[in-house]
Image: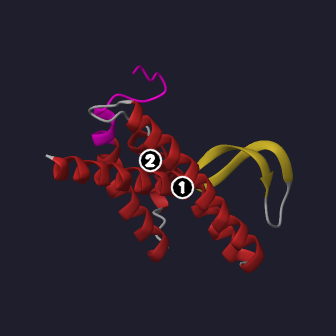
Amino acid sequence: MKLNYLFPNKYKKIGWFILIPTAIFGLLTLILDYEPTSLDVDVPAIFVDEVFGDKHFVGIVNNNILNEILGVLLIISLLMVAFSKEKSEDEYISKIRLESLVWAVYFNYTILLLSFVFIFDLSFLWVMIFNMFTILLFFIIRFNWQISKLKKSARYEE
């Protein structure tokens, strides 16, 4: 079955190779509130809204870009892991992929709805930040869990 929207299988290994250290370093960065001053740079921005300053549509701001670097690496690696072909991609794997994606969307938005009702202020902002990554994370977890169940049942039948 030809699937044009999936990356080649080798991208999955590259994705895991980027994802694991990026996730660990990202969590440590959040926990320890680490921002190296060497990454404070002037960057172009859209919708500049300084706390006690001007508001512009487009401008240059000084920002520590560590979070942006980690966020980009995390999204790229999650996409590579989530949407790389399996070694033997067939219709049943495609079905599992689709079901896992639908399940991940439902699960992610259930958490988001509960967050709207029960979480407020700055805590809600943190939920929204993590929510950017969780849909892919939930998909990867569910898809790999279903694939492992499929492989176990195939081994059992042999």
Q: Which mark is residue 133?
A: 1
129 with respect to 118 (left or right): left
- Viewer-proximal residue, 46 or 97? 97
State whether residue 120 appears in this view.
no
Is 109 part of what is drawn in magenta? no
Range shown magenta: 1-14
Question: Which residue of the protein is positioned furthest toward the left in this rendering?
Answer: 158
Dot 1, crowdedness within 10 Å: few (<14), some or many (≥20)?
some
Identify the residue at horizontal 30%, vertical 49% (top origin): 150
Instruction: Say what amino acid the circle numbered 1 marks.
Output: Phe
Q: Quadrant of residue 116?
A: bottom right
State whether residue 48 appears in this view.
yes
Magenta portion: prevailing SS class? loop
Identify the residue at horizontal 70%, vertical 75% (top origin): 122
Secondary structure of residue under mark 1:
helix
Is 5 part of what is drawn in magenta? yes
Q: Quadrant of residue 117?
A: bottom right
